[in-house]
Image (spheres, rainbow, N blue to C red):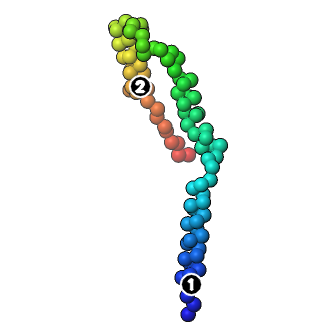
Amino acid sequence: MEMKTPKALMRLALGLALLGLAGCYPPSALEMDYGNSVRNNIAQQVVNPQAGFNPKPAVGLAPQAAAAEQEKYDKSFKADEKKSLEMKLLNQ
């Protein structure tokens, strides 16, 4: 019976050496640019970077008007019970 252990050990050693060599490979162009697109998108979403330092409160709707708009918005999602869709199947 042949002993195949030395061949298997040689293959294992070669595989480990290749993995070790891959760790020494220089960074690719993708790795050097990693995260720039996310940082760019976040920067594009900021309208006024100094807004956090402004002590004045934001001006908007009056509380009653805002509450009415919110109520109208919430009602737009409720299903109307008056409208119903019926499907009739005709067997002819």
Query: Looking at the image, which residue is at 56% across and 81% down?
Result: 6
In this view, which residue lies farthest toward the right?
29
Circle 1 crowding by C-alpha within 10 Å: few under 14, some 14–19, many from 20: few
Query: Looking at the image, which residue is at 56% across and 71% down?
Result: 13
* Dot placed on the residue nearer the N-terminal end, 2 or 1: 1
Mark number, residue 70:
none
Circle 1 sits on which residue? Answer: 4
Closer to the eye: label 2 or 1: 1
Q: Amino acid at mark 2?
A: Phe
**Image spot of residue 80 (x, y percent):** 40, 25
In the image, residue 46 above or below residue 17 = above
Image quarter (top left, top right, bottom left or bottom right) of the N terminus: bottom right
In the image, residue 71 above or below residue 33 = above
**Image spot of residue 68 (x, y percent):** 37, 12
Where residue 55 sits, quadrant-wise, is top left
**Image spot of residue 71 (x, y percent):** 36, 16
Circle 2 sits on which residue? Answer: 77
Residue 21 in sight from this viewpoint: yes
Q: Which type of secondary structure does the marked residue at label 2 adopt?
A: loop
Q: CA distance from mark 2 to mark 1?
A: 71 Å
**Image spot of residue 39 (x, y percent):** 54, 31
Query: Looking at the image, which residue is at 51% across and 42% down?
Result: 89
